[in-house]
Image: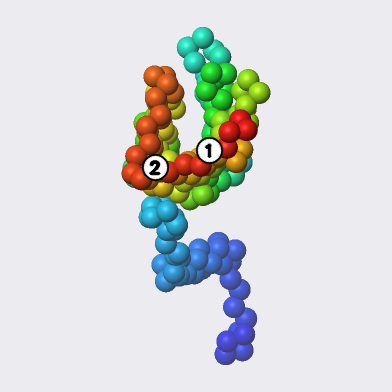
Amino acid sequence: MIGGHHIHWPPLALAALLALLGFWLNLVGVRPNIVDNAGFGHDPDYVVERFDALAFDVRGEPRHRLAAERMTHYMDDDTTVLDNPVFVSTDPLDPVDVRARRALLSADRRHVHFMDQVHVSRRSQAGREPITMETEYLHVTPDERVMRTDKGVVFRQGNSTITASTLFADGKAGVLSLGGGVRGTYDRTH
């Protein structure tokens, strides 16, 4: 009531007032800048919870599986960040699993960069104990079956241990190259 008169707001005027108020609040409000702990600062264009994808070869046989708790895609450089990713090779000749806290999938989807607490395991074959590897960074090229890192690695099989500063592994050629102060302890019970 103003000056003894009642003011009636038509619904359209009230809606316009609320829209203007919302627009003003959006302009003056502070938008949080999304910064990825791995050093990527982008605004995501989509996020997928409980991501799980299976890749097939030309014959239609499963080749590898990539899953994560969360997949965040960034449109500006077409990269994808994965939280708690799991990569599983379905190749019976190269049965490898890779787990990490984070991963970056390249724009062309050919490279996966695993970061933070990377754990690789090669499932047991022919009665041997499984082989595990730990590092803080691992670059995997699944189609070429190549893994590499310039961070320290620790291999374990039973009570045997090997440490190195660098690694290059080519699953197609059957090559494993370790460098930089390679040391090991071998348990003959294998």
At numbered mark 1, what does the secondary structure look like: helix, strand or loop?
loop
Q: Is residue 60 visible?
A: yes
Farthest bottom residue in view: 3
Q: How many marks?
A: 2
| Quadrant into which the N terminus falls | bottom right
Query: Which residue appears at 63% of the width and 20% of the height?
Result: 126
Label 2 CA crowd tier, 10 Å (few <14, some 14–19, many 20+): some
Q: Secondary structure at mark 2?
A: loop
- Give residue 15's position: percent from left, percent from top: 55, 63
**Are the residues flagged by discs 2 and 1 in contact, CB closer than 8 Å?**
no
Which residue lies at the image location 44% right of the left edge and 65% below the top edge? 31
Q: Is residue 103 left or right of residue 151?
A: right
Which residue is rendered at x = 57% and y = 18% of the image? 92
Identify which residue, 90 or 81, lies in the foreground.
Answer: 90
One can see residue 82 in this view:
no
User: Where 188 falls versus 27 (above or below)?
Assistant: above
Q: Position of residue 184 (x, y in %)?
A: 47, 42
* Left or right, residue 165 beside residue 68: left
90 relative position to 36: left or right = right
Residue 145 against residue 70 in the figure, above or below: above
Image coordinates of residue 51 in percent, x first then y, are 58, 38
Badge 2 amino acid: Val
Mark 2 = which residue?
182
Residue 114: x, y in percent? Answer: 46, 42
Alpha carbons under labels 2 and 1: distance apart: 13 Å
Up-down relation of residue 140 to residue 102 (above or below): above
Residue lying farthest to the front in this orientation: 188
Disc 1 designates what residue? 186
